[in-house]
Every structure is written in structure tokens, then in C-alpha cells.
Amino acid sequence: MDKQSRQQKIAEIIRHAKVRNQSDLVAQLTKAGVESTQASVSRDLTEMGVVKVGGVYRAPQLEPGQSPLVDHLSAEKIGDHLIVLRTGPGHAQSAALHLDRAKLHGVAGTIAGDDTIFIALRSRDDQSKVMRKIFTIFKK
């Protein structure tokens, strides 16, 4: 089975079952006829942006190209060097990962909680540009 198919199966399992750790997920994949290793599952979870919420895995992107952030995303400028981004419950870590991977010019770093991200900016001139870019990234 190719990686994309395996990741789709992982998303399906996570949607329908309470998966608490990677070994449980590997066992459920095996039960579904998908042979995988803990290492490949670990890489898949990272690539998919899967996070743990309440001790179980949640996949913020359940279908290719869809993001649950779209309906729940809001942002607020704080001072000159900070943006506070609010997401749906359990999606901040995945969204922060997407922002970090986008390597936005002017972003010094991100800190994510459950549904809130603090985005530290290098200068006050970067604030509006970064805010627009954030909505471009997540409103696709």
C-alpha cells in the first residue's frame, strides 16, 4: 500500500475509533490489512498534522485539501510584534506546524496551545503582511 492510501486509512481509523498511541494504531492498521511499522506511522502522523486531544489522536485534515480551520479561524493583532490566532478546538498545533513549514517572512516563531497560537513577529512592519498571508494559507 502506498503512503497516501495508508494515510487515508489512518485518518479513517482516527475518525471512527479512540486511538491512544501509535502501537494501537499499528494494530488497527494490521487488522484492516495494512502492514506498517511504528516508525512509518510516526512519520505519517507528523505529516498529516495529527495531534492528541484528550489523550486520543485527532486528524485536523481528514480529507485532502480540506481544513477544519476555515470555519473557525480568527486573528487579532496584539501590540506591534504579536498576532493571536484562534482555531477550532484541537487544531492549533497542526496550524502552527503549517505556519512553521511555510517559513513566512517576518515570523520569529509560534507557540501553540489547544485552540490558540501566539505568533511572534520580527518587526511591526511584518504584522499586516503576515496576517494577510495566514488567511491566504488557510482559506484555500
Image (cartoon, rainbow, N blue to C red):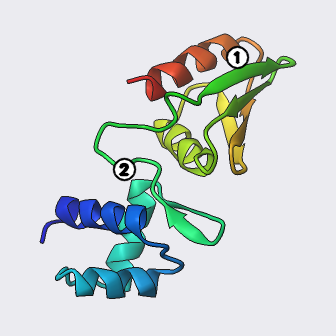
Question: Which residue is at 36% across, 66% downward?
Answer: 44
Query: In the image, 92: left or right of 62?
Result: right
Q: CA distance from mark 2 to mark 1?
A: 31 Å
Question: Which residue is at 66% across, 66% downward?
Answer: 54
The residue to which callout 2 is attached is 62
Question: Which residue is at 83% across, 17% downward?
Answer: 80
Determine whether 3 is above or below 97 in the image: below
Determine whether 42 is above or below 36 in the image: above
Percent from the top left, x then y, of residue 76?
75, 20
Percent from the top left, x then y, of residue 102?
47, 36
Disc 2, disc 1: CB below 8 Å?
no
Residue 121 is at least partly visible in this image:
no
Query: In the image, 87: left or right of 18?
Result: right
Percent from the top left, x then y, of residue 23?
43, 87
Q: Residue furthest left?
A: 1
The secondary element bearing badge 2 is classed as loop
The residue to which callout 1 is attached is 127
Q: Amino acid at mark 2?
A: Leu
Percent from the top left, x then y, of residue 120?
75, 33
Determine whether 108 is above or below 44 in the image: above
The secondary element bearing badge 1 is classed as helix
Question: Which residue is at 58% across, 46% downward?
Answer: 91
Residue 110 is at least partly visible in this image:
yes
